[in-house]
Amino acid sequence: MTEHSSRREFLKTAGATGLSALTAGMLTGCGALHRRFTKPGIELPRTHAREQIRIGFVGLGGMGSNHIEHLLRVPGATICAVCDIVPEKVARIQDLVEKTGQPRPTGYSKGDRDFVRLCETEQLDIVYNAAPWEWHVPICVAAMRNGKHAATEVPAALTADDCWKLVEYAEKFEKHCVMLENCNYGRFEMMVFNMVRKGVFGEIVHAEVGYQHDLRAVKFDMQGEGLWRRAHATKRDGNFYPTHGLGPAAQAMDINRGDQFDYLVSMSGNARGLALYAEKTLPPDSPLRSERYKLADVNTTLIRTVRGRTIYVVHDTHLPRPYARFGLFQGTNAIYGGHPPRVHIEGRSPGHDWEPIDKYADEFEHPLWRTDAAQRATGGHGGMDYLENLRLIQCLQRGEPTDMNVYDAAAISCVVELTARSVAKGSEPVSIPDFTRGRWRTNSPLAIVNG
Ligand SMILES: NC(=O)c1ccc[n+]([C@@H]2O[C@H](COP(=O)([O-])OP(=O)(O)OC[C@H]3O[C@@H](n4cnc5c(N)ncnc54)[C@H](O)[C@@H]3O)[C@@H](O)[C@H]2O)c1
């Protein structure tokens, strides 16, 4: 049985449970808000417009707290329930929410599967999660089975099989399953997207993106991500964190909406950085000094799309280096390069020179970044975290499809496992599944939204 057919078999058996869970959701009032607008597997869910969006939040660490602070400033967003395995974190967020004038959210902290109880008990529109990677899929599935939309931090899943699981649950239960890719809302990423839409780039031919962040101290920290992220580096190789680069690249290239990732090849170099860091910084008797790492310091991947575009993606988190989320978008008429953000537009830029992209801001600033909301978007990775939350809540309020959907989450997140497979086979090409099952050919391009 192939990987894809095995997922379909799974859903057949889950079908009966799914139907009863949907009915249960309607009976408790959660699902009742959402009419059956489409046939499963055919279109994206639309929902009834509603003003108040009731949120459950799982995982209240660094990124979870950041999201909550932003959500508390989004009109109509109400934090109804919060969950973390650490009771003190739950109490801290309950206090924070109450201080803003919202009712104290119900707290859940009875172990690492208490999010299931939250999903089963609470009347919510959406369950967010900013939990460690291995929990993203179980939390999204629990949300959707219980009649709630799901929003997950990045990457949405770690395997292609789990990506199919998210797609098939979203279709079965007719729920949104959104990956919270904040970089899609970065000011320059959005300005580039706007310029692409307006034809400034001509045809997009190539992109170079990546995540280049010295995470050595974070990975050895005795709290936060240090408690779980380093462990992944002992088990696997590949690109664990492709979404910050691939999110904006996929949007600019209309992936799932006119084009499709076709295949990738991936190559890893040596894994030196973490062991050397442990040797330099940890006491001689620390057990962590004997840990061995599989994740390369630098992993490089090339993706080709069905329409022949190429994307270079890098993951680089274990060596000394300044932060860079570089992005390069190259078309038949213009090129953008990030860090520092600059462009060259044929016929407008002098000679072969770069120009600061800000020179074109009056003409090409994305409409969302011109709104009052953008002026309020001061903190959180330069403001993009607020806009990401604002847009998601607005889509739910208006009953519109979300900017990023489950097919985008799957196409981008499956790269985690597929890069590992390619690396393990001497950089052999690996096919990327078409999670839309052919609908990418007819799906409409993503609109330019203005918030
Ligand atoms: N988009 C971004 O810019 C960005 C930045 C940082 C982190 N992240 C992502 O956010 C997620 C969380 O990262 P973080 O930095 O906040 O990590 P963190 O370790 O600070 O937070 C994770 C939280 O989840 C809790 N938790 C663990 N298991 C749980 C379970 N079973 N049920 C409920 N709670 C559980 C932990 O106690 C902790 O409070 C990750 O997916 C990460 O990749 C994204």
Image (tube, rainbow, N blue to C red):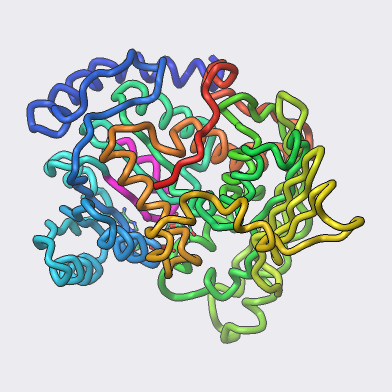
Kindly identify the residue that appears in the image at 60 percent across and 72 percent down.
216
Q: Where is residue 332? Give x, y as percent.
A: 81, 38
Residue beneath the point at 34% across and 51% down: 129
Rendering quadrant holding ligand 1: bottom left
431 vs 277, nearest the viewer? 431
Looking at the picture, does residue 198 appear above or below residue 353? above
Vertical relation: 276 (above or below) 383? below
Q: Residue furthest bottom?
A: 283
Q: Please tell me whether residue 136 belongs to the stretch shown in magenta.
A: yes
Q: Along the line of sight, which residue is nearer the eye, 39 or 352?
A: 352
Q: Is residue 240 rendered to the left or right of residue 343?
A: left
Q: Position of residue 136 (x, y in %)?
A: 39, 46
The residue sitting at 82% across, 55% down in the picture is 349
Residue 434 is situated, as x and y percent measured from the top left of the image, at 58, 23
> Quadrant of residue 279 in the image?
bottom right
Q: Is 105 inside the magenta-drawn segment? A: no
Which stretch appears magenta? 127-141
Q: From the viewer's perspective, is 145 left or right of 180? A: left
Image coords of residue 306 (percent x, y): 71, 24
Q: Quarter of the image holding residue 411?
A: top right
